[in-house]
Image (cartoon, helix red, strand yellow):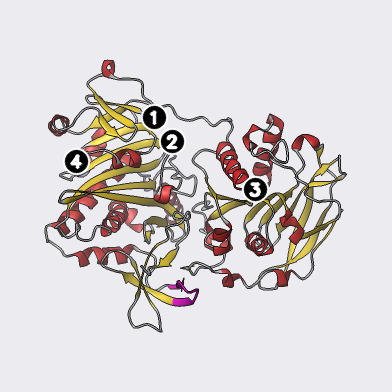
Amino acid sequence: MVICVTKGLSNLFPIYTKHLKLPRFIHSSRASLFTTGNMMNAKPPNVLIYSNVESIQQELVSFLRTVLAVNEYTVYPVTKHQVKARTWPESTNLFLVHGAVESDLAEEFLDFFLHGGKLMSVCSNLQSFVLSCKEWKADNLPQNALQRDAATSGKKFVTTLRDTQGATREAQFDELFWEKTNNSPSVVSLTDLKTGGKAVFSEIAFADSPNSSNLTSNTKSNLDFFRDLLKSQFGIKINLAIPPNVPAYANGYFLGNSRRKLHFLSQTVNPVKSGDLSLMFCKDLTDCLEPSSTMQPVLVHETPEDFDTVEYYNHLKSSHIGQLVIYLPVATSAMTIISHAELCHGFVIIPRQQTSGVGRSKNQWLSPKGCAMFSLQMHVPLNSPFGQRLPLIQHLVAVAVVRGIRGIANCDKLDIRLKWPNDIYANRVVKIGGLIINSRFDSDQAVVNIGCGLNVNNSSPTGCIDDLIREFNAKNNTNYPCLRIEQTLALIFNEIERLYDAIQCGEVDMQHLYDLYYENWLHQDIPVTMKDAKGSEMSGIVTGIDEYGYLLVKTDNIAQPFTVHPDGNSFDMMKGLIIPKYF
């Protein structure tokens, strides 16, 4: 029987803040970080997977990406180093652990659970650091050898744990499933009664045999079992269809006035090649080939039914940016398309949905309906103010996104701000948007491609601007309307061009952009912790950004601020990380 939580856990867990291996923004506890009143759910969408066997880890990633609800979660494999770096706790919805873990990793996982996190342990020795169980050996038995039954009369009791500060914590213990063959519990759970953290320990393997790495070939019964565990124990949203339904590719639409479109087509070889994809401009449906991941027909003289072109162009006041648009009901990745295509300055691709959205460092980019997404190509002369400071363009676009939203009637009252280097946050804690940027050089100019996703109408996976408006209406007895994506995009493009042209033409200097950026960002004078190449930790204060957009941090021991740049590892889309620039 499961008898007790191991005593002396205060020795197992070092002090929480001493786990830092990479610098990170100092923040409050997990429980308070995601408290936003009635506004949004605000749960982060990241699901992380650790296994000491790489092949099994990859199969688990594939398994979860199949069973988790589409456009609700991002699934990442993590390494031992990344676990110990502690860059992930505040940005993780669920952590799944498989196989053998060492004591230092066990400390990190259990600390996450005790601070309100969701933890699932599958055929791992992780439970041995918490639970004492003579019969439960976690033998990684094949599922078809287990006769599992729901433990309707299983043991339930409150037991004692100690958190990283050595404080006593109470947790509810529950036997969920019982294994008849070995006459022992096969799935148990612990719930921290203070933080609500949930840990589930399962002896049941995902594979049909102990040595199998083909985890997605389980029987329907076994697949349903784990889907039910994720849903019932953690509240994870699950795909109703396995494999998940993928939206069908459809014809795109070339938007703009006739003169602009004809001029572009006269200068363009049709089809436009973008990597493996061909953009085929068609006069009518008779010219169109079947849409696919490699063929994208684009109708030149038609307009879409689900994008109001009249509203869009009524609000668009720019001369170039956003005037020519390819609208795609379904795209693989608009950013991938525009990054490999030769277009013109200001050309925009607007997808309604994406099947393979990509963020920084090839991270997953969730693309649900209701998210305003665009990919913009800008041609920047190298001898111009922005040509000499290309990294500042991402800050220009970020500022323009926030100012474009606040330019909508009554939206100036919403708390929407910038998190360095490329995220949009609501109420200071909820990520509702982000940017990705890349560039290449072509003779005397840089071709800069910017991708942006902004949650406008979609409350999932984290929250959206409409949620902010509804919350404001409820608190102030107002009746402000929700946003239209067409108007929102047009006002953002207006603001991008206004700021870009003003600086490029010398109407204002670059300091104007810095002033606007500081008015709208989250980080002025906040404390950070850095670690240099020798392992020494330093504390400092954020003072601003430098001439190339990198973060400036002032320490007491050094007269001049340090320059730091964005973290380049697999957690680019996660909570506020910085790494010192020593090269």
Residue 97 part of the magenta-drawn span: no
The residue wearing badge 1 is 293
User: Quadrant of the rendered structure where residue 488 is?
Assistant: top left
What range of the chain is rendered magenta? Answer: 527-539
Disc 3 marks a residue whose amino acid type is: Phe
Residue 344 shows which numbered tag? 4
> Alpha carbon of mark 2 to alpha carbon of mark 3: how far?
26 Å
Residue 355 shows which numbered tag? 2
> Alpha carbon of mark 3 to alpha carbon of mark 1: how far?
35 Å
Residue 199 shows which numbered tag? none
Can residue 307 be spotted in the picture? no
The residue wearing badge 3 is 234
Indicate which disc, 3 or 4, sits on the residue closer to the N terminus: 3
Disc 2 marks a residue whose amino acid type is: Thr
Indicate which disc, 2 or 4, sits on the residue closer to the N terminus: 4
Q: Position of residue 356 (x, y in %)?
A: 43, 38
Q: Residue at x 49, y 49 (%)?
A: 462
